[in-house]
Amino acid sequence: MKKQKTFESPATISETIYQYIKQAILSGDLRAKQRILEREIANLYNVSQTPVREAIRRLSGEKYLIINARKEIIVAGASWKEVQELYEVVGLLDFPAVNKAMENITDKDIEDLRKMTRELKNFMDMRKSDSYLDLTLEIHDKIWSLCGNKFLYETLCHLIEKISFFCKQGISPYPEEAALQRSFEDHNNLLKAILNKDTKKLRDIITRHWYLPY
């Protein structure tokens, strides 16, 4: 937060600051429990603290920031239980989204998914869990974008951002190598089910894929 930022129309100042802080959190530049100073951000953008407060209230409502009893602004942390609950919700919405996407998927989409799945295996073999996770989220986004329901897609995109946020706070869905292997098997079988338009198989894969044991 040292180099002064600029913003472009038509984004409001508050929206620009909101996106800046949110991306810093999602990228891991701002870590869990790290304190944020309104004055520092206001100076960065050469604005009053009013639009900064608006952005912070919005991020607090989305649970990215916490405002404690002493009015300190802190980057939120995450618990394993919260991650499990988040995955449960994504799992409920994933099936209808993928099922709808099968109606709109093209040969080019299939080829893209095959390429991404091959790359996913490479990350698994090299045990690059961070790169693996990023690519799995890209694959899900690629499929969901084809569902034809913008509200369903936007909701899932918001939830995926939350997954990325939790993982940046040090909570990995792949606590051991076996979990990474199971995840890849699911993605490989997911592609096959989409190719075969096998709805029953699809539901079984998705139900297992998003389950995180307590």
Image: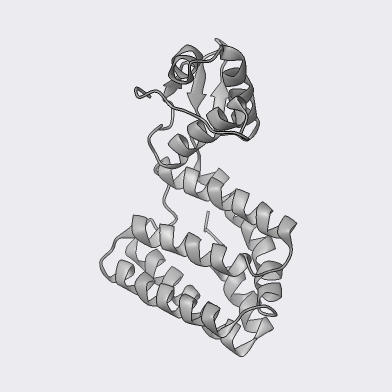
**Residue 200 figure quarter:** bottom right
Q: Between 167 and 9, which is closer to the camera in this rendering?
A: 9
Horizontal and vertical percent position of residue 21: 49, 31
- Residue at 56% x, 53% y: name it: 160
Q: Can residue 83 be spotted in the picture?
A: no
Horizontal and vertical percent position of residue 213: 52, 58
State the colouring used for the structure image.
one colour
- Residue at 54% x, 35% y: name it: 19
Q: Describe residue 162's horizontal placement relative to residue 101 as left or right.
A: left
Quarter of the rendering occupied by the N terminus: top left
Instruction: Report the number of numbered marks.
Output: 0
Horizontal and vertical percent position of residue 159: 60, 50
Q: Can residue 132 be spotted in the picture?
A: yes
Horizontal and vertical percent position of residue 149: 74, 63
- Residue at 62% x, 65% y: name it: 145
Q: Describe residue 88's horizontal placement relative to residue 213 as left or right.
A: right
